[in-house]
């Protein structure tokens, strides 16, 4: 199943993402148009839509796709979850997940144009997990059972703000508007042949910069769900950005960052791709109070 947000309405999308049916219409009003409410009743929704066909589907325009999960209550993100990414940033391999949050206002549509706030803006392709059942103290072996679906995501990061201060401001540097595009649809785990081993990658202006497989994660999706849920209950619709592989701009020598008009293409095998262009704005600018921080070798400054 592929769940989409089409112009603000929950929709089921055909496997090729060429057409869709409106959830409220095909369920006779049993489920309303709000994609977030669908996730609140995820098991009932799966049962009610298990045999929905696409004979009466409408053509799908990619321009109508919004964030499949538009209003999560909690957004968790994991730093340094790929060994080679830790190594490229001269960081210590973590012995436990390094957790921060992206603010909900950063979540955006799959093909969002992202205002460049100034500073050192970097890319981070990630597999993003959406929770479908309340999860608390979940054993690792049961982690996937609590997942509604997965998406492609970008944990876009402004490195100067991210690493300013002691302790550093990870959540702020990763939460400008548009810094969390997700999509193009939410794909249920049963659609994936091997959900623990998916190819993912990122291109900048058509040049490949990141390529990896999710099986290379230090902490797998079920392990992350277990560890997080042993501290905070995970709620339906919550998101987990599961970490980025090697190939980020700050890891290059010299570091390379995004400029206005640069375009990111991010993909995950079996899910699809999202496309995000950096744009300028005369209104939205980064605070003048953010210091000009240099990336020091040997200092744990990645995420």
Image (spheres, helix red, strand yellow):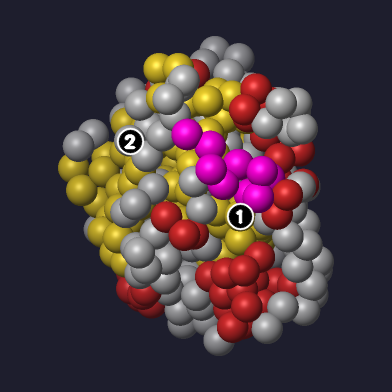
Q: With 258 as the anchor, is 54 left or right in this view? A: right
In the picture, residue 265 is in which quadrant? top left
Q: Secondary structure at mark 2?
A: loop
Provide the residue designation for mark 2. 16
| Span highlighted in magenta in the image | 45-53
Q: Residue at x 74, y 72 (%)?
A: 229
Provide the residue designation for mark 1. 148
Q: Which one is in front, 75 or 2? A: 2
Q: With 177 as the anchor, is 253 left or right in this view? A: left
- Density class for disc 2 (Cα within 10 Å; few <14, some 14-19, many ≥20) is few
Classify 251 as above or below 215: above
Q: Is residue 299 magenta?
A: no
The spot of residue 153 in percent (x, y) is 47, 46
Q: Is residue 172 shown to the viewer in this render? A: no
Give the Cα separation between the discs numbered 1 and 2: 20 Å
> Could you tell me if the residues under marks 1 and 2 are in contact, i.e. CB atoms within 8 Å?
no
Q: Which one is in front, 227 or 2? A: 2
Classify 126 as above or below 289: below
Q: Which one is in front, 116 or 139? A: 139
Q: Secondary structure at mark 1?
A: strand
The spot of residue 198 in percent (x, y) is 34, 63
The spot of residue 216 in percent (x, y) is 36, 75
Q: With 27 as the anchor, is 195 left or right in this view? A: left
């Amino acid at each position: 199943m592929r769940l989409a947000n089409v112009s603000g309405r929950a929709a089921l999308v055909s496997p090729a993402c060429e057409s869709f049916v409106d959830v409220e219409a095909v369920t006779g009003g049993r489920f309303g148009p709000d994609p977030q409410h669908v996730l609140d009743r995820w098991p009932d929704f799966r049962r009610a839509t298990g045999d929905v066909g696409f004979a009466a589907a409408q053509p799908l325009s990619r321009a109508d796709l919004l964030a499949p999960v538009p209003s999560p209550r909690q957004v968790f993100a994991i730093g340094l979850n790929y060994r080679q990414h830790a190594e490229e940033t001269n960081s210590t391999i973590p012995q436990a997940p390094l957790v921060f949050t992206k603010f909900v206002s950063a979540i955006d549509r799959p093909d969002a144009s992202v205002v460049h706030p100034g500073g050192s803006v970097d890319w981070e392709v990630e597999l993003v997990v959406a929770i479908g059942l309340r999860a608390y103290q979940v054993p690792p072996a049961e982690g996937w059972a609590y997942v509604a679906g997965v998406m492609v995501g970008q944990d876009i990061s402004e490195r100067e703000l991210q690493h300013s201060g002691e302790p550093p401001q990870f959540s702020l540097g990763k939460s400008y508007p548009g810094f969390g595009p997700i999509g193009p649809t939410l794909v249920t785990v049963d659609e994936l042949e091997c959900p623990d081993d998916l190819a993912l990658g990122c291109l900048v202006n058509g040049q490949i910069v990141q390529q990896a497989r999710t099986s290379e994660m230090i902490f797998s999706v079920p392990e992350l769900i277990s560890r997080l849920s042993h501290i905070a209950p995970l709620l339906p619709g919550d998101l987990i950005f599961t970490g980025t592989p090697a190939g980020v701009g700050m890891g290059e020598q010299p570091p390379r960052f995004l400029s206005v008009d640069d375009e990111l293409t991010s993909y995950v095998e079996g899910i699809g791709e999202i496309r995000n262009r950096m744009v300028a704005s005369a209104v939205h600018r980064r605070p003048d109070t953010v210091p000009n921080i240099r990336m020091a070798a040997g200092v744990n400054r990645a995420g």
